[in-house]
Image (cartoon, grey):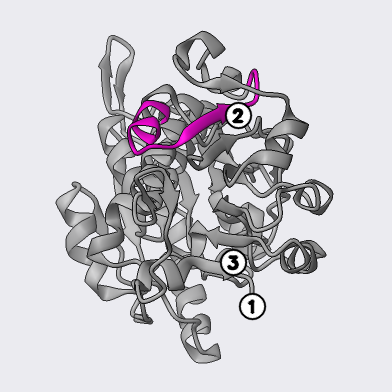
Amino acid sequence: MPTVLACLQERAPGERRVALTPETARKFAALGASVWIEPGAGKAAAFADADYAGVERRPREAILEAADLLLCVQSPEAAELARMKPGATLVGLLAPYRADEREAVLDARRLTAFAMERLPRTTRAQSMDVLSSQAGMAGYKAVLLAAQLSPRFFPMLSTAAGTIRPSKVLVLGAGVAGLQAIATARRLGAQVEGFDVRPETREQIESLGGRFLDLGVSAAGRGGYARELSAEERALQQQRLAEHLRGVDAVICTAAVPGRPAPRIIDAAMVAGMRPGSVVVDLAAETGGNCELTRPGETIEHAGVVLAGPLNLASSGALHASEMYARNLLNFVGLFLKDGTLAFDWNDDLLTGSCWRRPQG
């Protein structure tokens, strides 16, 4: 029998994305899989059930019991994992760094779980890199949120009432989210700066029309990520950044260290030194925030400065975010779905690098 490849409706609060789109459903069927989906799974991302031509609609319980390969955006909870078919495979953003009972359930059900957060960030893996595709949407949406919250225009305007200068936007972190934020702020006409402790990002920031903010701190790490700063480096960075923030209108925070709390970059004293009407949008809110005052999931005001800590911002662009995510999964699953059957090559570094749990013995 062909592999049953399935997708459930996401149940995490605020999650609007879907792991299977009509486009990728057709392509999985062409790979020989029998494709199932829970009714309404794509509705929040603007995909109607009727769009999934040729896909079988099955209730949630039936999918859990029969699916050989389950695609998800966020991991099902332990109670649902415990109802999955023994020996099945799970692929998605599984939050493997989160300590909970899911590991024991995965082992007990002999499930193979691929956490896409752990995918090696190599040239070969680019078409499967869900972190990059979703970060691009988050960076874009973060700038739109900042523009909405700001009491200022972003572009320079010449009006009958005089000339209005462009807003000054500072983006902290020049990963995919940060670079997308820089590009978006530039398109909106803002005067944009980018800061990152990795010196190799200067060229990327400047290629997008931003100015590289050099605070005299370099902390290049492995795999394209930044290492943690020493106490001395952090003190120097904090001092120079505090001075610079006094002239900034909007800050987009995107700095992250995989598997660890977000680095604290902006403290309360820095916020107090910013001009009233300034805005901070903290994309790192889900892992503690780059700003000391960030409240995950809330927008607050402190000393005249608006601070937003949005959660799962990529989900607010659910249609395009889902399309990108689903294509990432299609490319990844194509490594081991051959002629309707699952065949894992455990010598493939992309599979071993992203595998969170697999049956032993």
User: How crowded is the residue under tag 2: few (<14 C-alpha within 10 Å), some, or many (20+)?
Assistant: many
Marks 1/2: CA distance? 35 Å
Marks 2/3: CA distance? 24 Å
Badge 3 element: loop
Residue 16, label in figure: 2
Which is more N-terminal, label 3 or label 2?
2
> Which residue matches tag 1?
360
Question: Is mark 1 in CB contact (under 8 Å) with mark 3?
Answer: no
Q: Is residue 168 visible?
A: yes
The boundaries of the magenta stretch are 25-40
Residue 137 included in the magenta stretch of the image: no
Identify which residue, 303 or 345, lies in the foreground: 345
Amino acid type at image mark 1: Gln
* Residue 132 in the image: above or below residue 213: above
User: How crowded is the residue under tag 3: few (<14 C-alpha within 10 Å), some, or many (20+)?
Assistant: many
> Which label sits in the foreground, 1 or 2?
1
The residue located at (51%, 89%) in the rendering is 230
Marks 1/3: CA distance? 33 Å
